[in-house]
Amino acid sequence: MARIGAVAALLTSVAVSPAGAAGEWQRVGENAQGGVSGIAYEGPAEDGAGVRVLVVHDNKRSGRLRLSRVTHGEGSVSVTPLAWDGPEPGDLEAIDPIPGVPGEYLALTGRGIVFRLKVGASTAQVVDYTPLPSIGEGDDFEGFALVAREGRLAALWADRGDGPGRPATLYAASVTFAAWGQPLFGAVSQQTYRASYPADDGTRHVSDLAVTDSGRLLVSSAADAGDDGPFDSAVSDAGRVTLSSAGRVRIALATSPTVLGTYPGYKVEAVECLPDSADALLGTDDENAGGSVRAAPFC
């Protein structure tokens, strides 16, 4: 597997300006290559006062940064680029930790390729990759989440949709793993989802997904008018997710999703509930303006 030398050269941890107190946006990327398109919880910060998360970047060109480690605390944030070891994805849009398998993650590209990763101190190694089992015509994926209940595992993923004429399509299936690491998906169910906010032309009804410990489904939605904006986005309580002891996953979408927070001027593309906390960590991909993160009490 080829290692990307251009990224490896950047592996010194870089402190990004401490952009304010908890609940405010903190910058983690300065340009279009540093946007946050997905977040996965990794563990507590070394000082115990914050968290470490992995963030994916939707860079498409060979040799560009795909994955970074962000340490987020109250009033401060630092970013460490990680080397990518293995076949390069086209555009990573989401990532989630594999429950019960420390240091391993599933990451999803916009075209529906799932990468299983093993992440160490400085490198993300590709264990295997496979296409999603159900890809509709024109699907452009941005949301992905894993749910574990009673020893069973399920995946949720979503085509983002496009404005009033194309709602998002939300998919769900059980997940197991082959002996060599490949994700194996069960029968797929699907349903459509429309965001309550924003509602402009070009709205991405789903830009990410997260499921709380109690089974609430959180959905971020975003409006993108181009690489320089303006942007708008929101996080909503969209319904509930249940996973039976037999591995059957069911999504009950709310008739009218409850908007939990709106973020004019930002394009939220990542939502991750933090363990043992009511907080979610949100991430933005603001194109030429870079990327930012902040905590919000949504979980």
Image (cartoon, helix red, strand yellow):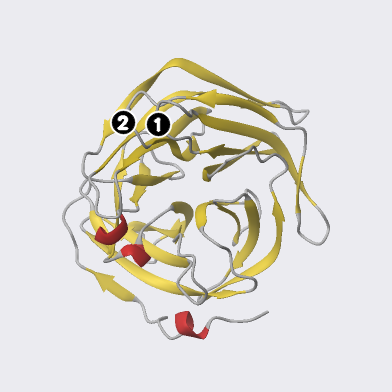
Which image quarter: residue 165? top left
**Left or right: where does residue 296 sit relative to residue 56?**
left
Q: Is residue 221 left or right of residue 143?
A: left
Q: Earlier in the sequence, mark 1 or mark 2?
A: 1
Quadrant where the image shows the C terminus: top left
Label 1–label 2 contact, CB within 8 A: yes
Amino acid type shown at disc 1: Gly
Q: Position of residue 223 (x, y in %)?
A: 32, 39
Q: Helix, strand or loop at disc 2?
A: loop
- Is residue 151 visible in the rendered image? The answer is no
Write the residue at 19% across / 63% down.
Answer: 18
**Placement of 264 over or under 4, stated as above or below:** above
Q: Secondary structure at mark 1?
A: loop
Depicted 16 relative to depicted 37: above or below: below
State the residue at coordinates (37%, 37%).
Answer: 202
Q: Is residue 17 left or right of residue 37?
A: left
- Three-letter amino acid code at disc 2? Asp
The residue that appears at 47% across and 58% down in the rendered structure is 43
Marks 1 and 2, how far apart at CA = 6 Å
Judge whether 199 appears above or below 123 on screen.
Answer: above
Query: Alpha-carbon neighbours of circle 1 within 10 Å: few (<14), some, or many (≥20)?
Result: some
Image quadrant in which you'd find residue 28: bottom left
- Would you name the residue on which mark 2 appears? 200
Q: Answer above or below: position of 4 versus 33.
A: below
The residue that disc 1 covers is 163
Q: Tell me if residue 44 can be seen.
A: yes
Q: Which residue sits furthest left?
A: 20
Q: Nearer the viewer, residue 238 or 280?
A: 238
Residue ID at (33%, 25%): 259
Residue 238 position, x and y percent, is 45, 24
